[in-house]
Structure formats: C-alpha cells, structure tokens
C-alpha cells in the first residue's frame, strides 16, 4: 500500500511524525493532497488530552488541497479541483440532519478530530463536504475558511444588529476573526478583551475600537464605562475559561445576547444566579461550536474578496515534522504566534515573510 508522511498523536503529549498508509476512499469520498492546514487550539487540546479520550489519530481540520482521487459515485468534484473541506460529517437522515441542524447529529464526526485529518500528505473526506475554491484564493488563505466559518456562525447566532455594541472575549485567531465579522455585521463599537499585548494590537489593526488588556484592567468595569453602565448589547466568549465566561455574563446588558464559542474543559462547572443573571435580565444564550452549511460559502467569499483581512493573523509556517514544536509555540504564545500554518511543502518552522 502507498505510504505518506503524517503527524500522529499516540498518547497524551506524544506525537510522532511517521510513515502511514495513504487513506483508502469509499465510493462517496474524495482523496485530497494536502496543500495547507492551519494549527488550531483544538489540536493543542487533543495533544494534551484535554479534549477527547486519546487514541492514535492524525489531527488537522483546517485545510485546503487538491483533489487527486474521487470515489465512483462522486459526480460534482473532479481530480485537479482546488478545495477546502467542511470537517463536520453528519449522517444526513436523522432528526437533526432533517431539521438542518447537522452539528447536533448523533452520528457526527469531525475530520481531523474524530478521524484522521490533514497533518499529513493526504486526507480523505466525503464529497458532499467539499467546497471548490475560487481561482484567486490561495491555498494558504483557504486554510482559514474553517475558523472563519465558525466565527461567522457564532456571530449569526449572537444576532448582532446594525449599531450594536459588541464585546469579544479573547484575542486568539478566533477572537480576531470575530472582531472583524462583528465589524462587517455593522457593530457600532467592538471591544476586544485579552491579555497578550501583541494580539490586542492586531485587534485594533483589524477593526476593534477598544482593546482591553485584562491583565491591567478589569474588563467588566471597562465595558460598563464604555456603555453608560448598561453592558454590551452582544458578548461573544471565545476563550473557554471559567473566569471569562463569568465575566461575559456580567458584561452583557439586560435583554442582551451572549454567544458561547470558547471551548470550556469538559466537566467544568460554573455558578449562576438564575434570577439576576438570566431571568430578570431577559438574557438570550447561544452555544456555538462549529461552522455549518452556508457559513462556509460566506467565509470563502469574505476571504477571496479581501473583505476579511487575513494577512495580519497568519504569523508562522511549519513543516510536517516541526508540528510538535509548532504546537508548543502556540500553547506558550511564544514568538508573537497567532495562526500557524503547516504544509508538506514547507521547510522548518519560521515566521511568515
Ligand atoms: Zn479549528
Ligand atoms: Zn444525522
């Protein structure tokens, strides 16, 4: 059987770059030659065993590439197509799938999380999850379709109205994407909260009106000051820590919307006062854990037309065999890292030029 290079998680903190078999495709699947794959916080969580029980798996769910093989029942995708892939694979026939809520499908699996992904020379996916790229979109930019699709869906769910004040908790790649999408959605004021100076600077560069360094300032107090004591119309949490979730509940105004996008550790518990925090506040809550359906098409459009400023978020590139090092760079926020891209074609681990 044909072999390929891949970065495989074997156990908690144990990743090896090794030769494995090239995936075999089924009739309704395609084989994609990986061009670029983004490294996500989820990959770090998988590596550290915080996310799922660890089993040998090739991570990588934010990818672009070229189709090199198609199954016999695949009609619309051809060999040579330049593509990105929605990693959320659902059954298509259950109650949730029939209600256009495929992320809630009990049979859902995610390529690069539950099945082998794109930290490898090849990756397979069902043809129905494949999106063709416009000619002018580079593989590097296309690899950000997934995180942007997730961000668009969170903003959709948060229900931003033109003129709203919006707080984004978090200054990672998703936080910085949310800042821009909120801006594009017509927010009158976007406040980004984080505690990494270099990232907060980027937040201002890509459209935040105010960047709050939570290591120096109390973000709840600051948001209150900026909104005449009311709190923000919309708050989107994109950190996933207990403290930031608690702050998010305090920052949102009465009658406001709170979207929960940061991934909390499984089993995390949080204290809420149902009367003050929700009932009397008439709070609307929206969980949001991935992108779906049309958010992919909209993400591709925003990136390929340049309406979404992606350049400032891409900071590093890593060869496949440097991925373990790249994961630790990301985890420790060293070297001003924001988004790290990996590719079988890259050499070493370096800053984007
Ligand atoms: Zn991701
Ligand atoms: Zn289903």
Image: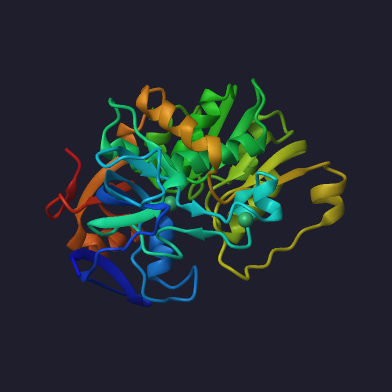
The residue at the point 36 percent across, 42 percent down is: 84
**Nearer-the-camera pick, 137 or 198:** 137
Residue ID at (24%, 39%): 80
Q: In this view of the protein, can residue 161 be seen by the observer?
A: yes
Q: In the depicted view, which residue is nearer to us: 70 or 131?
A: 70
As drawn, 161 above or below 286: above
Q: Is residue 233 left or right of residue 279?
A: left
Classify 232 as above or below 344.
above
Residue 206 seen in this snapshot: no
Q: Look at the image and tell me in which quarter the N terminus lies.
A: bottom left
Q: Nearer the viewer, residue 151 or 27?
A: 27
| Whether residue 321 is situated above or below residue 127 in the rendered picture | below
Residue at 31% across, 56% down:
123
Q: Residue furthest bottom?
A: 11
Q: Position of residue 176 (x, y in %)?
A: 44, 38
* Left/right of residue 304 with respect to residue 291 in the rendered view: left
> Would residue 350 appear left or right of 285 to someone viewing this image?
left
Q: Position of residue 353 (x, y in %)?
A: 16, 37
- Residue 108 position in % (x across, y down): 56, 59
């Amino acid at each position: 059987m044909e072999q390929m290079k891949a970065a495989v998680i074997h156990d908690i903190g144990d990743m090896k770059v090794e030769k494995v078999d090239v995936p075999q495709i089924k009739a309704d699947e395609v084989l994609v030659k990986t061009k670029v794959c983004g490294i996500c916080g989820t990959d770090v969580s998988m590596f550290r065993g915080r996310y799922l029980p660890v089993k040998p798996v090739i991570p990588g769910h934010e990818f672009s590439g070229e189709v090199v093989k198609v199954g016999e029942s695949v009609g619309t995708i051809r060999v040579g197509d330049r593509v990105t892939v929605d990693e959320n694979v659902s059954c298509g026939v259950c109650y949730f799938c029939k209600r256009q809520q495929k992320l809630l499908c009990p049979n859902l699996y995610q390529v690069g999380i539950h099945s082998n992904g794109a930290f490898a020379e090849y990756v397979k996916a069902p043809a129905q999850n494949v999106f063709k790229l416009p000619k002018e979109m580079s593989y590097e930019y296309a690899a950000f379709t997934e995180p942007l699709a997730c961000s668009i869906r969170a903003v959709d769910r948060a229900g931003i109205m033109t003129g709203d004040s919006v707080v984004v908790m978090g200054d990672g790649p998703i936080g910085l994407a949310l800042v821009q999408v909120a801006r594009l959605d017509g927010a009158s004021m976007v406040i980004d909260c984080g505690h990494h100076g270099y990232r907060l600077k980027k937040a201002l560069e890509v459209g935040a009106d105010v960047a709050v360094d939570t290591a120096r300032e109390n973000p709840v107090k600051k948001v209150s000051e900026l909104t005449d004591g009311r709190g923000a119309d919309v708050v989107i949490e994109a950190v996933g820590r207990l403290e930031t979730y608690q702050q998010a509940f305090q920052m949102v105004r009465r009658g406001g919307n709170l979207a929960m996008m940061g991934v909390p550790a499984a089993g995390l518990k949080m204290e809420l006062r149902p009367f003050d925090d929700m009932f009397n506040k008439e709070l609307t809550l929206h969980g949001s854990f991935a992108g779906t359906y049309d958010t992919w098409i909209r993400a591709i459009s925003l990136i390929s037309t340049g309406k979404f400023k992606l350049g400032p978020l891409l900071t590093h590139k890593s060869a496949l065999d440097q991925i373990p090092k790249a994961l630790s760079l990301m985890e420790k926020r060293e070297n001003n890292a924001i988004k790290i891209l990996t590719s079988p074609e890259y050499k070493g681990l370096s800053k984007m030029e």
